Image (cartoon, rainbow, N blue to C red):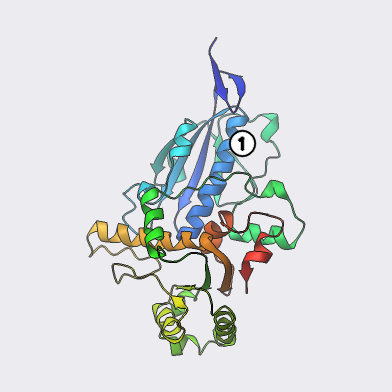
Amino acid sequence: MIFYKSYGVHLLKKEMRAKIILHCISGFGDQYANILTGYKACKDFTNFGYEVEILWINKNLYFSPDLPLDYLYDFSLFKKMNIKINYIHNESEISDGFLYLNTGQNAIKIFVDKIIDEINEYELPVFDYFGFRRNSYSSFCPEKLPDFDYQFINEEVLEIGNKFIEKKSKIKSVHFRCDDLFILSDYDIVLEDVFYNSMINRVYEFIEMNNNQDIMICSNNKSLVKHITKNFKNTFYNTFDSDLDLHYSYNKNYEEMININHARQIVAEMTLFSRCDNIFTVSKSLSNFLTYGVAHNHYHKDWDTKIKNLITN
């Protein structure tokens, strides 16, 4: 009889299989939240006794979806867990004999070849900024939050982030997420919107209140970033190598490595929120671009109060 060791528990040879579907469709914050949540699902189903496989449905909007996501993410932890990672075009490619397990949400889907009692009422918490914030301001439930310190961005991307702020120590940031309608608009046009107009003075107040610290200005609108950094000496922005858009930027007219490097720089900027002790965020809805910075923040570790101490809006 063959025995396998998993998380310190000896299990009989695995005969049950689970396929965890991760979607790569929208922005990098959503993608990263899927990886965090997917890792939680992998841990759980490995402990239930399943042999787990990750299947990415890759419709990447930043570089060719024919390329693997390893250009951005570090999946080595999954490999250490003997979890295979493959790519499919849609769920119809899942072989017969697998049953869909309703986990209460659609960001990640789980299919198993055998239902056991332990998973009959299984609920998978979603590790994204929406979930983190709900948990902070409603009933606090630690079991619905990450209980691990692992991060899943590859070293090349992290190094880009290090170079962006290599001469700076602790920083604060302004995260200004414009609606898609305003991404390419000039600063003055953005301020014609009632909500953004009402928020911009609060942004200025935040910058002036912290005039003794470096403040990173991050937005999907380049005109807004340049206007703010031009008018406040303690602000800065990260200079990218190409003039590609900052949102869904894949351009087939560019060489593939230009698209890839641009994507890496966007993700590198996303990771820098983890180096901020305070983030002023402006958005009409919660933005998952902050998920990494909240989950792996260097200064705020206590999940009970993390959002309230880290985020200003």
**Residue 119 vs residue 203: left or right?**
right
In this rendering, the answer to whether 87 lies above or below 134 is above
Give whichever of 145, 284 is nearer the camera.
Answer: 145
Image quadrant of residue 260? Answer: bottom left
Q: Quadrant of residue 194?
A: bottom right
Q: Quadrant of the C terminus?
A: bottom right
Q: Residue 9: x percent and y percent?
A: 62, 23
Q: Residue at x 54, y 19 (%)?
A: 4
Relative vertical location of residue 187 with respect to residue 265 in this rendering, above or below? below
Please, what secondary structure does the residue beneath circle 1 have?
helix
The kind of residue tagged 1 is Asp
The percent position of residue 54, horizontal first and vertical second, equals 47, 39
**Residue 132, placed above or below residue 207:** above
Q: Nearer the viewer, residue 225 or 287?
A: 225
Local crowd at mark 1 within 10 Å, few (<14), some, or many (≥20)?
some
Q: Would you name the residue on which mark 1 appears?
A: 44
Q: Is residue 149 visible?
A: yes
Identified at 46% across, 44% down, the residue is 91
Q: Position of residue 229 (x, y in %)?
A: 43, 81
Q: Residue furthest right?
A: 139
Q: Is residue 207 left or right of residue 268?
A: right
Query: Horizontally, is 31 left or right of 70 in the view?
Result: right
Q: Residue at x 30, y 72 (%)?
A: 243
Residue 108 percent across, percent down from the top left: 55, 48
Q: How many marks?
A: 1
Residue at (50%, 44%) from the top-left corner?
Answer: 21
User: Quadrant of the image for the N terminus?
Assistant: top right
Q: Is residue 61 visible?
A: no
Instruction: Name the one closer to the observer, 203 or 71.
Output: 203
